[in-house]
Amino acid sequence: MPLVRIDLRRGKSPAYKKAICDAIYKAMTEAFNVPENDRFMIVNEHDADNFVHAESYLGIFHSDDLVIIQITANDTRTIEQKQAFFACAAELLKENPGLCVHQSRRVQKGKQWHRPIRGDHELANG
């Protein structure tokens, strides 16, 4: 049962947040073979004072539309499945709600697998 945590600035519409949840769930079902209805997601909205990030890091610009997605799952997926998941999630999030996705490093903690996904709305050349 993967657990998905989504953090973003307060003020996005319910449709925007649903699009993010739907994209991540679809990518998990396609790449991780997650069973139907294995959908556990927590959406946290933050005021600007409680959502602090660098404007630019490692050459990647982060707007106030930054979205951080963290997935906690047992480390039973192959590298190929993980790569397929991130490729699928990036494409789906780009389609709706229009996020440009940058994948950050994988963080291993115990037997759980954590991989934050950072996404921003960006200009076409960003």
Image: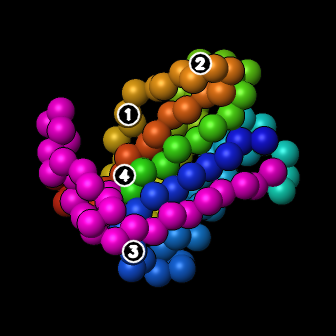
State the separation of the CA atoms marked 3 and 4: 15 Å
State the separation of the CA atoms marked 4 and 1: 10 Å
Q: Which residue is mark 1?
A: 104
Badge 4 element: strand
Q: Which residue is mark 4?
A: 119
Mark before the other along the chain sequence, 2 or 4:
2
Badge 1 element: loop
Mark before the other along the chain sequence, 1 or 3:
3
Q: Are marks 2 and 1 in contact (CB under 8 Å)?
A: no
Would you say residue 40 sits in the magenta stretch? Answer: yes
Residue 94 occupies quadrant: bottom left
Q: Nearer the viewer, residue 91 or 32?
A: 32
Mark before the other along the chain sequence, 4 or 1:
1
Q: Which residues are magenta?
A: 38-66
Q: Nearer the viewer, residue 109 or 84?
A: 109
State the separation of the CA atoms marked 2 and 4: 22 Å
Q: Residue furthest right?
A: 36
**Residue 45 position in % (x across, y down):** 45, 68
Q: Are marks 3 and 4 in contact (CB under 8 Å)?
A: no
Neighbourhood count class around disc 4 (C-alpha, 10 Å): few under 14, some 14–19, many 20 upward? many
Q: Nearer the viewer, residue 91 or 116?
A: 116
In the image, is residue 65 above or below residue 61?
Answer: below
Badge 3 element: loop
Q: Which tag is nearer the camera, tag 2 or tag 1?
A: 1
Q: Are marks 2 and 4 in contact (CB under 8 Å)?
A: no
Q: Is residue 17 left or right of residue 28?
A: left
Which residue is pictured at 67% across the width and 53% down the height? 25
**Residue 49 position in % (x across, y down):** 27, 66
Q: Which residue is mark 2?
A: 79
Badge 2 element: helix
Residue 19 in view: no
